[in-house]
Every structure is written in C-alpha cells, then in structure tokens.
Amino acid sequence: MRRRPGGTAKGGEPVKLTANFTDPGLNDTHVCAANWDDGTSQTFTSRGRQCVREHTYTQPGLFTISTGVTDDDGVADAASVMLIVYDPLGSFATQGGFLNFPAGALINDPAATGKLIVEFNPKCLPGETGPVPGGGKVAASLKGAAFALDSTSLEWLVVTVHQKVAVKGTGTVNGVPGCGFVAYGTDTPDAVRHVVWPLSGRTVPAGDVAVRQPRQGGL
C-alpha cells in the first residue's frame, strides 16, 4: 500500500479518481476497488490500465481514498491518497489557551517541557470560494524553550460538522521563515495538535518533523 498527499475539493462537487496501473499480462482483465473513507466503497471494471470513478462528498473533512486493483490471476496492488474536502461557507474556527507540552515533542530539544501558548483563528472571509482562508492566523509558543511558530500564509482550512478543524500553512519558527505546519483542533473535548516541519522544497513532512506534538486537552 502506498499513500501520497492529494489535493483539495469543494464539498458537494464531484471528485474524479484516476489511478493508473501496469500489468505485463496483455490479456488480463482487472477489477478496481475504491474506498472513499466516508462510509462508501465501490468495485468496478477498469478502463484499459486505469481505475476511473467519480464521487461526491457531502461533508467537509480529511479523507484517505484507498484504491486497489486485482487481475484475473488474483494478483493485486493498492495505493491511497489524502483528499481535503472544504466548505468555505462554514469555514471558521477559534481556539486559544495553553496546554502542557510533553517531553519529546520538540525534536531538536527532546527534554523541553512547559506551557505551550496557542492562538488559532483561521476563517474564510465573505465572498471567498476556498480552500485558502483569507483571515486569521495560527501561532504557538513554548515558554522557556526556543520554539515560537507564527503563520505567514494559510493554504487550506477544513471545519467538520463533528466540531473538528484542520488548517495547513507556512510560517516562521523563532522568526526564521521556511517551515510548514498543520494545526488540528477539536471542541469536544477541547484539544489541539500541531505538526511543524522544514519545507526544504516540499509541502508535506518527511522524516525531519520539527514538532510532532501529541493531541492534548487542557485549553
């Protein structure tokens, strides 16, 4: 199973899945399977060497689409991709306060602990169509340690009907630009999680995550 980052889609609009595959068997036939991660799944016949399907998400969220293909000899392969489904009309979140920062969460200073102060208020402004929110920011600073995150741009914002929020963007750490982040929050119970990494020419974290803070309450 291979998993890679995907794109964004607006809730209520069709999402087209196209998964290419290879097979040395020239006369093989293939059955595709798609799990859309919202309680629905499908099986269908391939189009040549492609699995092609459309699906419409009715609610915003972060969904991992899993696709598999099996030939008539029983040989199978699979891959997955994450899709961000947003709704600009309902995209607003406010969260702030502090939490106990656990040892090991700050990669370059594993012993660092203390109070992490967070500010989290991204929102889509009137007339914006998404996925980029035009208002608000994300900030987090750890007292007594060299870590202070400040957002400089936001990439997407997802607010679900289950009172969960996620926002992705870029920013500075201790005033130095060049980091990416994803901030997560929930309302019931109050909880927050930040993942921060150096961009280094990519948009998703790899093995050099700077902060991988476990989700905690206490806000």
Image (cartoon, rainbow, N blue to C red):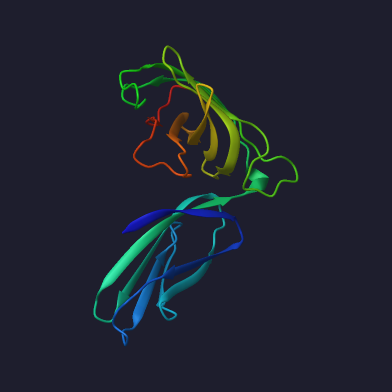
The residue sitting at the right extreme is: 127
> Which picture quadrant has residue 57?
bottom right
The residue sitting at the bottom extreme is: 27
Rendered-image quadrant of the N terminus? bottom left
> Which picture quadrant has residue 78?
bottom left
Residue drawn 41% across the image and 15% down it: 145
Q: Position of residue 118 (x, y in %)?
A: 51, 23
With respect to residue 15, does 170 lie above or below? above
Q: Position of residue 30 (x, y in %)?
A: 35, 79
Q: Nearer the viewer, residue 156 or 34?
A: 156
With respect to residue 203, does 57 lie above or below? below
> Which picture quadrant has residue 210?
top left
Q: Does residue 186 show up?
A: no
Residue drawn 45% across the image and 32% down it: 194
With respect to residue 214, does 128 lie above or below? below
Residue drawn 30% across the image and 78% down it: 71
Q: Nearer the viewer, residue 15 or 210?
A: 210
Residue drawn 42% across the image and 26% down it: 217
Left or right, 136 with reference to 66: right
Q: Position of residue 115 (x, y in %)?
A: 43, 16
